[in-house]
Amino acid sequence: MTSHRMTSHRSPKPLADPDRPVERAVTAALVLAALAGLAWICGMIYTVAQWPL
């Protein structure tokens, strides 16, 4: 009876599961948003550093 799987138990799926493309799209969007935010912060630091004091 070791091969019997309980129907009430749901095993966690991996993040890169091809059956769930929505999670991959959300993850990609979050990564792009984080990179955009980091680039914006770097641009602000560069802009402030260029100001004549």
Image (tube, rainbow, N blue to C red):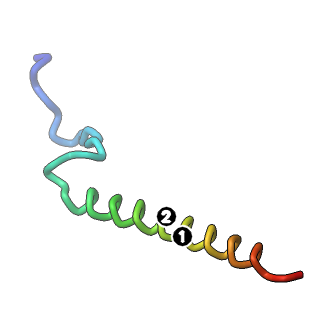
Q: Nearer the viewer, residue 6 or 37?
A: 37
- Residue 25 in the image: above or below residue 14: below
- Tag 1: residue type? Gly
From the image, tell me which residue sits under label 2.
34
- Residue 52 in the image: above or below residue 37: below
Q: Is residue 23 left or right of residue 5?
A: right
Q: Is residue 19 left or right of residue 30?
A: left
What is the secondary structure assignment of the residue under circle 1?
A: helix
Residue 37 is labelled as: 1
Q: Mark 1: few, some, or many residues within 10 Å (few <14, many ≥20)?
A: few
State the residue lying farthest toward the right: 53
Q: Mark 2: few, some, or many residues within 10 Å (few <14, many ≥20)?
A: few
- Residue 44 position within the rendered picture, expressed as x and y whole percent measured from the top left: 66, 76
What is the quadrant of residue 32 in the picture? bottom left
Question: Looking at the image, do the residues carrying marks 1 and 2 touch, with CB atoms under 8 Å apart?
Answer: yes
What is the quadrant of residue 37 in the picture? bottom right
Residue drawn at (28%, 58%) of the image: 23
- Residue 51 position within the rendered picture, expressed as x and y whole percent measured from the top left: 79, 81
- Residue 3 position within the rendered picture, expressed as x and y whole percent measured from the top left: 10, 20
- Residue 20 in the image: above or below residue 53: above
Q: Is residue 53 left or right of residue 51?
A: right
Residue drawn at (10%, 17%) of the image: 1
